[in-house]
Amino acid sequence: MQTRWQRIQNRLHNIVFENDTWAGRAFDITLLLLIILSVISVIVETIPALDQAYRPLFHVLEWIFTGVFTLEFIIRLLAVGSPIRYVFSFFGLVDLLGILPAYLSLFFIGSQQLVVIRILRLLRVFRILKLQEYTSAADVLAASLRESRAKITVFFVAIFTLVITLGAMTSVVEGHTNGFESIPVSIYWAIITITTVGYGDIVPSTAVGKLIASLIMMLGYVIIAVPTGIVAVSLTGVANRRELNSQACPNCGRREHDTDAVHCKYCGEKL
Amino acid sequence: MQTRWQRIQNRLHNIVFENDTWAGRAFDITLLLLIILSVISVIVETIPALDQAYRPLFHVLEWIFTGVFTLEFIIRLLAVGSPIRYVFSFFGLVDLLGILPAYLSLFFIGSQQLVVIRILRLLRVFRILKLQEYTSAADVLAASLRESRAKITVFFVAIFTLVITLGAMTSVVEGHTNGFESIPVSIYWAIITITTVGYGDIVPSTAVGKLIASLIMMLGYVIIAVPTGIVAVSLTGVANRRELNSQACPNCGRREHDTDAVHCKYCGEKL
Amino acid sequence: MQTRWQRIQNRLHNIVFENDTWAGRAFDITLLLLIILSVISVIVETIPALDQAYRPLFHVLEWIFTGVFTLEFIIRLLAVGSPIRYVFSFFGLVDLLGILPAYLSLFFIGSQQLVVIRILRLLRVFRILKLQEYTSAADVLAASLRESRAKITVFFVAIFTLVITLGAMTSVVEGHTNGFESIPVSIYWAIITITTVGYGDIVPSTAVGKLIASLIMMLGYVIIAVPTGIVAVSLTGVANRRELNSQACPNCGRREHDTDAVHCKYCGEKL
Amino acid sequence: MQTRWQRIQNRLHNIVFENDTWAGRAFDITLLLLIILSVISVIVETIPALDQAYRPLFHVLEWIFTGVFTLEFIIRLLAVGSPIRYVFSFFGLVDLLGILPAYLSLFFIGSQQLVVIRILRLLRVFRILKLQEYTSAADVLAASLRESRAKITVFFVAIFTLVITLGAMTSVVEGHTNGFESIPVSIYWAIITITTVGYGDIVPSTAVGKLIASLIMMLGYVIIAVPTGIVAVSLTGVANRRELNSQACPNCGRREHDTDAVHCKYCGEKL
């Protein structure tokens, strides 16, 4: 039998961590709005013109959000069975890091800046948005990325080797001048080039440097096909597996029926 | 029985809104040419050299197009059963916004500029180009984009969270200088970087900033694979379904059977 | 019976236009080398330092290539049945345009510049490279592009409408300054942005302009998925159709056998 | 019977070239760490600030790594049956080029710079990382790239012809000024544009030049779909073939049967 505290804790848990009750849903949506508002406030505060004009307002808003999120954090601590495990979970840490800097700013000048970390709380969007269609879409995406993990790792190792080798070569060719001073900067340039970003803050000036740059660009242009192919193939696989009825026909035993099939498409037997 | 006015309205409707008669087709093609000409005129008018040389000509052309499109708008109002519903429909609003600014410019200086809105009328191209092949191609594209809606939404939420978080981090790291003054501008930079556009008007100057930039570039380079994979898979699905057995079941009349199906998958009847 | 002239013409045709004889192959490879050399000479000649040092050499080379290609052109004229049709064919025009500018330069100063047109002769590479594997690969690519024609047209119409609308909007928003002087230039900027090229020679400076730019970037980032999806789907289709044996089993009549199948995979009958 | 030396050589070979024993695995991981450390040292050494502060340290590290890698090279020479063949193999050359510059620097000033070549030793990562999952992923990627070789070659020939033709045209149109001085530089610009890198160091300034640039951008934006489609299709093919029935025919022993095959497609035997 549950004690009275356990019953309260259970109800709190349902409201704060789940969203299948009316109260849980209301809590989640309110929290989502507050997080978005606090993020907007943190972002807007950094615009010099607005900061000068409304600094006191931002200060007050800052402490209101800190207060509300502190309260939420305490409720979460009360609602879970083992508070320690929650604090050291991913979302526990994000929640704590979202309120800590404001308090630290009372003691240490400059830690105010870290309030920016509160932006990470936006990640809760994924937790809160448990709407059926989107979760399933996110599941398919996550599953197909997980499945392609090995291929993408190999791809990244290849890219890094390429970028380091070609960056270092260009650094030597360009004579360590004009932005190619050191190899790390040249690697940064090679990444800018192979990903087709092309800032243009560093550009080769020698003929050989331009030749290597052209090579990197062509490589980047074609190599992009590889992760795309990987993800497309794996998405097809995951999507197909979800879509095929895994049921075998009781008469002929054949599978691969569509999910909306009522009768076996080969022998006509009822599935 | 139709009154005489209804018969006229019907004929008008056939000409103005449909394109299966000779007159409707002629009307549509004339309109398309006029829209393209008026858009070219609006565009070309903004070239300083041409504007100075031919200002009176552009002025006349402007009023000719406004006159013709006003006439067309009135005919459309007459041709539909409920003019109010047409005015507040998407294309009704676009048509109205295409002629209004010219008239407003008689009363308010500067509203002339809004004639640019007329460019939106180009969207009628899609309405007019009802040629079989292209409509079916557009249908497949639209269907596959609609189908991937949930996945693309999840993808965009993820991108926005990434871009806000990494933009804010870079702003702090770069010390709110050199173009990273405020977080909104830093988010703008992160979008420029993750989409591999890379204007180069804002670039990180610290080592840590360059590291974060490299991370964003690599992310953007691989993440592009996700929408491509989504669209490719969904296009395959839509295309396949169109290739499905177009045969209807003789018993229940439902379609969408696989090409190798022998029995109806819904009722078991032999196909 | 063939006259003697027809026999000679036939042999010439085999050598100059076909590549299934020893002589035809030798002619093609020699021609390919000469074209590549002449293109390299035209390209290298424009490097200021080399031009000053070796101008006489380039002049001589220029006339040697013109002479050889003129001879080749005359032989081609003799080898075909109807010289007029050849001259007005695509490759005939390219061949003519490749030699004409050199002769024109004797009469008109400046037409020398047009020798650059000779680069178009590089397109003969595709004609000459009739190697089995590459032709079949090119066929698959061409077939899948041809098949996606309607979808790609719709895609381009959509892109153009977007680019014109958003370019004009940004031009108004940015107040026709800082590189957004006229709408054509703003459309050029929108194309630079939506294709993720991002030169950075024109960048928005107002907050609203940056917002529109971000929107165009995100659009460009996701829209790229559409042609990729189209081509991937159509390539799969073309490739599959080529790979499946269209032969039906003489016993059970089922198809979709692999090209290397000897027996029906369903009933075991010899194909 | 093996001589004592052959037994030792065998054991050495197992340790140095294989990684299925405990000792071989330890050797490989140690070597991988040393290579990564030496590469980091070579890279970091080029940062001006660090170079000035710690030059003696880098000098010592340099010689330690050279010593260790020389030892490793000698052991490899002893471990293989034919040392000559090893030295002239790809990895043998890379290993030799990794240590040679350090020794050359004793005699020739400046060859120190070539130590950068040591970065190529990073390629050993692929040799050492023989972990099951990654090797199989790399195999699939390599197989699908090998399979698309012909298509990608055709694609590259087409791109090069385009880039040369359009680059030369733009050079003429822009009047050989503003960065379009020579055709090679204009080709470099065309590559920057078609791959959507867009440095912005060279940009067209005439209206026609901007038109050609827009054309190249659109081409580059759509053409990227081709290699992506090629790789996606070929990856699907390779992945599918791996999923094929791994069962060998009991009669003729051949594999590669479809998963729904009942009879061997080569000899007709029941599977």
Image: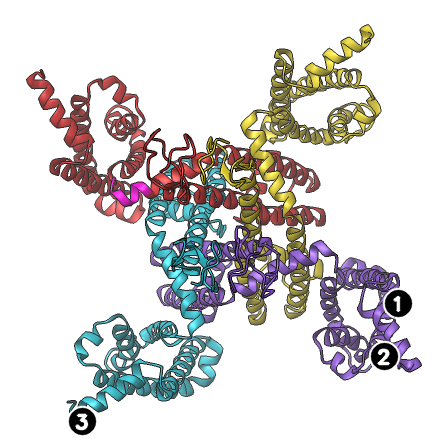
Chain colours: A yellow, B red, C cyan, D purple
* Quarter of the N terminus of chain D within the rendering: bottom right
Residue type, mark 3 in image: Arg
Which circle marks residue A40 in the picture?
none
**Could you tell me which quadrant the C terminus of chain D lies in?**
bottom right
Q: In this view, does B215 lie to the left or right of B96?
A: right
Residue type for callout 1:
Val
Q: Say if D196 sits above or below B87 in the image.
A: below
**The quadrant where residue A132 appears:** top right
Task: Report if residue D9 lies within the magenta region.
Answer: no
Q: Looking at the image, is A247 positioned above or below residue B86?
A: below
Query: Which residues are the magenta region?
Result: B130-136
- Specify the principal SS of the magenta part: helix
Label 2 sits on a secondary structure element that is helix
Q: Do the residues labelled 1 and 2 touch (CB within 8 Å)?
A: no
**Residue A115 appears in the rendering:** yes
* Image location (x, y in percent) of residue C2: 16, 89
Distance Cα–Cα, label 1 vs label 2:
27 Å
Q: Which chain carries label 1?
A: D
Q: Which residue is most to the right?
A: D4
Q: Which chain carries label 3?
A: C
Q: Distance between the residues labelled 3 and 1?
A: 84 Å
Q: Is C253 placed left or right of C17 in the picture?
A: right
Q: Callout 3: helix, strand or loop?
A: helix
Query: In this picture, is A90 found above or below A68?
Result: below
Question: Label 1 neighbourhood size at 10 Å, few (<14), some (14-19), many (20+)?
Answer: few
Element at label 1: helix
Q: Are marks 2 and 3 on the same chain?
A: no
Q: Can residue D223 be seen in this view?
A: no
Q: Mark 2 points at which residue?
A: D78
Q: Where is residue B67 in the image (x, y as percent from the top left)?
A: 16, 31
Label 2, label 3: how far apart the Cα atoms are: 73 Å
